[in-house]
Image: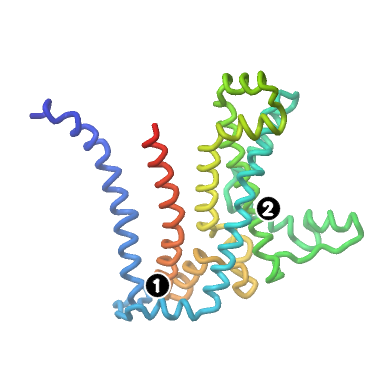
């Protein structure tokens, strides 16, 4: 019996632990979170059923829309990471003396913890003695207090978070550039392609899958933004830099409103589900074409 069924038994045995882990950590946790979002709960006492009241309150809360707007800003600005990562990858991929050292410098932010990056940029943005203040003082100007300005603080944090994200995209594109087809590049040269034409018609089409992965991971990373905000501003000033993930954390941990926090988590999950669905559909379509 074992020999007759081993063609599907072995794959099942190997994949079963991952399926169980995914089911418990992701699926069961998500369902629990959705159930909690329908209750009023302080995390310790009994849960009180309130139906969709947490969602009604959420969509009447101006802070929710501030956090949602900041998530959109994160998402739009983070889309700069793939093209900038590609540009740097093309630069450091050149066979020029010193490029290995330059490559290691661009790689540095990727190995730093997000908390460390946040601390570094908090110092950079410090109005009196930060690096930004030194740059402004060189032109006789005074640096703006970016982290204290409700209109600029989100852009400042996203600027800091872009640093490691660009490095991540650069690594992806470097791996893609090292796997380009020499035959296609040679054929392009025979046809007279060079410079921008070579990049547009020969190189970029071969980097299509890498670009797709870079965009998908960058979008999901933007929606998961939390640690940089926690380190640099804790959502301030006056909640102006908060995003949905941080709002969920603040409502659950500091305000003991786990039901309301779970409702925010459910909304964030639905938004991320759009990108995850798009990502999985593209992956499955690519698999079908092979």
Examine the rendered structure and indicate whether residue 72 appears above or below residue 40: above
**Is residue 116 found left or right of 61 in the rendered image?**
right
Please name the residue shown 65% across and 55% down the image.
Answer: 119
**Disc 2 on helix, strand or loop?**
helix
Quadrant position of residue 233: bottom right
Type of colouring: rainbow
Residue 93, how many percent across, how many down? 66, 29
| Residue placed under numbered mark 1 in the picture | 258
Residue 277, how many percent across, how many down? 41, 52
Please name the residue shown 35% across and 76% down the image.
Answer: 41
- 71 or 184: nearer the eye? 184
- 218 or 138: nearer the eye? 218
Q: Residues within 10 Å of mark 2 (few under 14, many from 20)?
A: some
**Disc 1 on helix, strand or loop?**
helix
Quarter of the picture containing the N terminus is top left
Quadrant position of residue 186: top right
| Residue placed under numbered mark 2 in the picture | 120
């Amino acid at each position: 019996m074992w020999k007759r069924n081993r063609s599907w038994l072995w794959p099942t045995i190997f994949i079963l632990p991952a399926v169980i882990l995914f089911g418990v950590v992701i699926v069961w946790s998500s369902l629990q979170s959705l159930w909690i979002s329908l209750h009023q709960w302080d995390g310790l006492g009994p849960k009180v059923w309130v139906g969709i009241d947490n969602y009604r309150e959420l969509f009447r809360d101006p802070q929710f829309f501030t956090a949602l707007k900041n998530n959109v800003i994160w998402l739009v600005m983070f889309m700069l990471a793939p093209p900038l990562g590609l540009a740097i990858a093309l630069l450091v991929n050149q066979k020029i003396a010193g490029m290995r050292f330059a490559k290691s410098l661009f790689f540095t932010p990727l190995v730093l913890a997000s908390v460390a990056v946040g601390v570094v940029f908090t110092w950079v943005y410090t109005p009196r003695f930060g690096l930004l203040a030194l740059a402004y003082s060189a032109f006789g100007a005074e640096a703006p207090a970016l982290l204290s300005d409700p209109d600029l603080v989100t852009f400042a944090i996203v600027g800091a978070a872009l640093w490691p994200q660009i490095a991540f995209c650069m690594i992806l594109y470097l791996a893609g550039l090292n796997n380009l087809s020499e035959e296609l590049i040679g054929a392009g040269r025979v046809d007279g392609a060079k410079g921008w034409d070579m990049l547009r018609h020969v190189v970029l089409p071969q980097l299509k899958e890498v670009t797709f992965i870079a965009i998908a991971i960058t979008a999901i990373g933007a929606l998961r933004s939390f640690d940089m905000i926690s380190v640099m501003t804790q959502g301030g000033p006056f909640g102006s830099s908060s995003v949905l993930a941080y709002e969920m954390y603040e409502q659950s941990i500091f305000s003991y409103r786990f039901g309301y926090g779970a409702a925010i988590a459910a909304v964030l999950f639905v938004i991320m589900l759009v990108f995850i669905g798009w990502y999985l559909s593209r992956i499955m379509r690519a698999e079908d074409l092979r």
